[in-house]
Image (spheres, grey):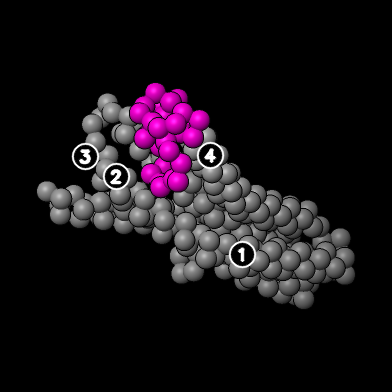
Amino acid sequence: MIVCFQQEKTFLPLKSWTPLDLNVDSFYYLTVIFQFSVIGILITCDTSLDCLYYALADVACCQLDILKENLRNIEPRGNLNVKQELIVCIKYHQEIIQFVEQIESVFSIILFLEFFKSIVNICFIGFELTMANFLSLHFFMGFIYLNGLLMEIFSFCWFGHALILKSTEVEDACYLIKWDECSISVQKIIWMIMMRSHKPLAVRALFLTIKISTLTLILKSSYSYATVLRTIYD
């Protein structure tokens, strides 16, 4: 905003048409403040949506930790008691699975659009940075924006990858149960939990599974497209 006030009256943070005469100080400052307010609102909405996904994924991870702790604390005092505790754990596990499916149903398209937007933006910003002066304000602003994009998609992939790891650790927790002291029927229930845990829980952005390798795929795609643009420009 300070930069806008130091520039000519035709300089705006966002290139746009306005019916006001920007040569008039009051109209110019009002337009600048309005545009910065809109930018602030958009940033708040975008970050709030991201934080909602982070929070829900983290809640799912915490619930999986609780499930693992419940499984570890099962003691074969009696086959009936163990069977009841395992049934409670199975129901709890099923609720966690449904919760993750609900997260995916809400965020699947949103995450896909976010990743597509990130690929395009990283591509063009990377191309512009190779053309900009290293010490210019344009390079500095582009570099900050690029880091923000990278941090956003890294956070998406990190929480998605954490969910995958936590869900597979449920199978490891089953091994800590003293299953050799339980009856065959109880062992079958434990085996059922292990078989379901063998398939990791994951959030998918349409056909993309949210994990760390997805971040690598996005960066490779962005770099490839930026290289093509650079080749065409040269």
Position of 169 with respect to 226 (left or right) is: right
Residue 43, position as x, y percentages in the image: 54, 44
Image point (43%, 38%), residue name: 21
For the image shown, how many numbered marks are present on the structure? 4
Where is mark 3, residue-wise?
Answer: 131
Label 4, label 2: how many angstroms apart (C-alpha)?
29 Å
Where is mark 2, residue-wise?
Answer: 126
Name the mark nearer the viewer: 1 or 4.
4
Name the mark nearer the viewer: 4 or 3.
4
The part of the chain drawn in magenta is 1-29
The amino acid marked with disc number 3 is: Met
Question: Tag 1 or tag 2, which sits nearer the N-term?
Answer: 1
The amino acid marked with disc number 2 is: Gly
Q: Is mark 4 in CB contact (under 8 Å) with mark 2?
A: no
Res 133 visible: yes
Residue 138, position as x, y percentages in the image: 31, 34
Q: Secondary structure at mark 3?
A: helix
Label 2, label 3: how many angstroms apart (C-alpha)?
9 Å
Residue 182, position as x, y percentages in the image: 78, 67
Where is mark 4, residue-wise?
Answer: 34
Where is mark 1, residue-wise?
Answer: 106
Label 1, label 3: how many angstroms apart (C-alpha)?
39 Å
Label 4, label 3: how many angstroms apart (C-alpha)?
31 Å
Question: Tag 3 or tag 2, which sits nearer the N-term?
Answer: 2
Position of 141 with respect to 195 (left or right) is: left
Question: Tag 4 or tag 1, which sits nearer the N-term?
Answer: 4
The amino acid marked with disc number 4 is: Phe
Question: Tag 3 or tag 4, which sits nearer the N-term?
Answer: 4
Q: Is mark 2 in CB contact (under 8 Å) with mark 1?
A: no
Dominant secondary structure of the residues highlighted in magenta in the image: loop
